[in-house]
Image (tube, helix red, strand yellow):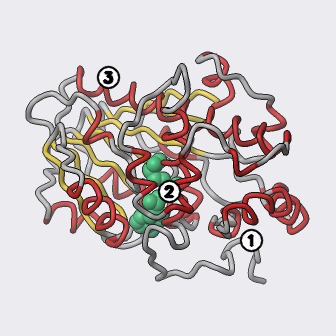
Amino acid sequence: MTDVRETPSVRSARDSWGITESVGATALGVAAARAAETAQADPLIRDEFAFLLVSAAGPTWAQMAVSDPHWLGADADARRIHEISRNYQAVRTHYFDEYFSDVAHAGIRQVVILAAGLDSRAFRLDWPAGTTVFEIDQPKVLEYKTATLDAHGAVAKARYVPVPADLRDDWPAALVEAGFDPAQPTAWLAEGLLPYLPADAQDRLFELVGVNSAPGSRIAVEAFNMSPERYTEERRAQRRARGEQMRKQLDLDIDVDALMYTADDRADAAQWLSEHGWQVEAVPSADEMARLGRPAAEADLAEFGMDGVLMRARLDGERL
Ligand code: SAM
């Protein structure tokens, strides 16, 4: 029998999207959180391109990127959730910024950001001379991003190479075509990606990363707890009802749950990498949030799917 959780009804094996459509809109959502964090009095991270990249999608989206979520009105519960989500996004951004700083110090000069969305690290981090940042995402998402940054005269701080490709396809061919050198150690990133890939595409992604990783390569990954009991129809309906205020006020109908593949047989990313020769260091997101002074209750993080793990791994010996 087909598991109804495996294929969300709004997704299909060959689907593609622009920035305001389907999974593309999730890139606007997380960039809006970075913009809102950047606008706080004491921000944990600064992404000075986030507001620009979100607001270029139109005034409806721009509202999401301001410091105070005025569109939530006086709904205290919705405001609390919004704050937890902004804190979570700030903490994950901080974690992966630190990862890139470490890999740069370790001498790695080839970077691949998988599912880059509106990630602006190529433009905002201080990369050592000689660094190339490749970014893979859907063609229309990257077109929107590069057109927006170009229109505002943004200058990358590394050699910046967008690589339009579908991460369920033969993306390494497109990467090599764009100048990627598999013989050089690479620092990979998979942030905000895994739930949008079917379980078998996640395995394939990690396999292809491994095949294209010279010794000394690193990877950083955000992995979520995708336990099936939180994706029952009832729990989905509850989350949708809670988001009703946002949909009404903003006139945006985003149901992130419906975009994710929530099958129960997804490999645990840390375990998969360890079993394939990577040395993994993982931290529960809740611990990292507490460490950085943005604590959140475990129950809240679980309820809103932010109780995952942030990890980095290195491939020093043989890929298994
Ligand atoms: N990593 C970025 C960040 O954290 O700001 C973007 C994360 S956003 C939540 C998810 C991104 O994954 C979107 O930009 C989407 O286009 C991309 N994505 C998801 N599935 C993809 C696929 N099969 N091929 C290419 N890009 C994909």
- The residue at 21%/67% (across/down) is 174
Measured along the vertical axis of the image, is residue 161 above or below residue 13? Answer: above
Q: Nearer the viewer, mark 2 or mark 1?
A: 2
Question: Visible in this render: residue 289?
Answer: yes
Residue at 16% over, 61% down: 176
Q: Nearer the viewer, residue 228 or 192?
A: 192
Disc 2 residue type (three-letter): Leu
Q: Which residue is mark 1?
A: 5
| Residue under label 2 | 28
Q: CA distance from mark 2 to mark 1?
A: 25 Å
Q: Percent x, y for residue 290?
A: 67, 19
> Crowding near pointer 3: few (<14 within 10 Å), some, many (20+)?
few
Circle 1 crowding by C-alpha within 10 Å: few under 14, some 14–19, many from 20: some
Q: Is residue 14 left or right of residue 80?
A: left
Using residue 93 as the reference point, say whether residue 189 is left or right of it.
left
Q: Are marks 1 and 3 in contact (CB under 8 Å)?
A: no
Sequence-first tag of 2 and 3: 2
Q: Which tag, 2 or 1, sits closer to the chain's start?
A: 1
The amino acid type of the residue labelled 1 equals Arg
